[in-house]
Amino acid sequence: MRLDLTLRMTQKLAPQLIQSLKMLQMPVQKLEQVLRHELAVNPLLEEIETEEPEQESPQETELVSEPDSRKEEETVDWEDYLRDDGEYDVREYKSESKELPEFGVASEKSLYEYLLEQLSYLKLTGEDIEIAEFIIGNIDESGLLSCSVEELAETLKVTPERVERILMKIQRFDPPGVAARDLKESLMLQLRERGIDNNLAYRIVDEQLETLDRKSHLQIAKTLGVTVERVQEAMDIIKTLSPHPAYGRFARAAAAVIPDLIIEKNGEEYVISHNDRNVPQLRVNAGYKELLKRGNTTPKETKQYVREKLEQARWLLNAINQRRNTMIRVMQAVVHKQIEWFEKGVEHLRPLTMEKIADIVEMNVATISRVSSDKYVQTPHGVFEIKYFFNSGVNTEHGEQLAKRTVKQEIEKIIASEDPGKPLSDQEIFKLLKQQEISIARRTVTKYREELRILPARFRRRTTT
């Protein structure tokens, strides 16, 4: 028998922090559902009636300090817990929203929530969980990863190999093909999921995908040294694959978008407010004070129960305050860095990383990811996902940087103005962008076109009479 003494460090989050992170991750419609549930199960919480006069609320909510730990029940200062200064009532987070049209709320699970649920089944710990959550936060609605492994590694200050290792785990999630970096990888992942990654279909995707729109089945057969019949069979399999693995199951078209934040221009400044007018406004029920002030006449079990529910109420209201404060601070930083977009229009979106905003607000990058994922903001230019404002840059020939979204908009304009009888190839689009001093590779043009869900030239051709 051999005895070993080992020291293992584990990271354990406090219940308050876990609750705050969950709140921060929720879009406003989910937050409303959670608070309605808490109202039903915690008797110490009550909703402020709309008739009651609302107090002025500052734009940024000051964080409420976390409660001190209490070891002995009878030494608890209940007056400190339930003081009358309104520290935990609705005035800390009352609605600042303006009147908006009524929106329907979709109850179906989003792709982001679905992937996070699967992540919880993996045995990841510590920083690996944050890396995985950040990867999932950068998966777009089509199911593809919106940035490179190198960009993720640079933002998270970890090695690309570590990000790649965790990405491979996420790429085994449902739906098949999710978290792929491009169309080719997504199709290959889907074929592997079906167990047919050693057949001709896999080889065609791997070796011939970029030329499929220019080659006939006969040409592909000659290149690969197989019969035309086999190529036809392989192409029939490829046609059953999805270029956008998440579309269909997680389509958001039927779900009304409810913005979490509202940005309005007031004079020369942009004012950011919360759209939580449908969220119940909560406070601690003052009626329980009398119960706790009775001293020894109140049974010990009753005091313990009330104390537990009071702690839960306190943590909940604190988490709401932190959510509001964090979202406001992050959005203020975004507006400051994207001020040209707000002043001049959507064509003036600048490159901006979550790391940059994290440095400005002195928060973790994973926190910025939680704020931006699956949440929307109403701006003078329309409603946008908060994640929209984060994107990497593309260099021009003069050394300036354009946002990826701006380059995509240019590609859309070029294709929209093409001759339907002679649609432009990706190479021709590449040359036109170069004339505009936008320097990107031809394969990048192909990637952006696919992300825009625009078909290759051969499928865009229309005959005119």
Image (tube, rainbow, N blue to C red):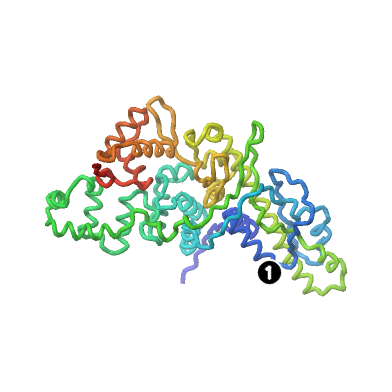
Number of marks: 1
Q: Nearer the viewer, residue 68 or 286?
A: 286
**Residue 37 position by quadrant:** bottom right
Where's residue 50, x and y in %? 75, 57
Left or right of 227, for residue 162: right
Left or right of 77, for residue 389: left
Give the residue at x 25% y 52%. 205
Above or below, comparing residue 304 to residue 284 in the picture: below
For numbered disc 1, what is the local secondary structure? helix
Q: Which amino acid does label 1 sit on?
A: Val
Give the residue at x 83% y 64%. 289
Above or below, comparing residue 430 to residue 9 in the picture: above
Asked whether residue 337 is in view, the answer is: no
Left or right of 177, for residue 198: left
Task: Identify the image quadrant of the C terminus.
Answer: top left
Density class for disc 1 (Cα within 10 Å; few <14, some 14-19, many ≥20) is: few
Q: Residue furthest front?
A: 465
Residue matched to label 1: 41
Q: Nearer the viewer, residue 375 or 342?
A: 342
Where's residue 119, x and y in %? 47, 60
Q: Which residue lies furthest to the top in this view?
A: 398
Above or below, comparing residue 399 to residue 176 in the picture: above
Above or below, comparing residue 334 to residue 291 in the picture: above
Left or right of 227, for residue 350: right
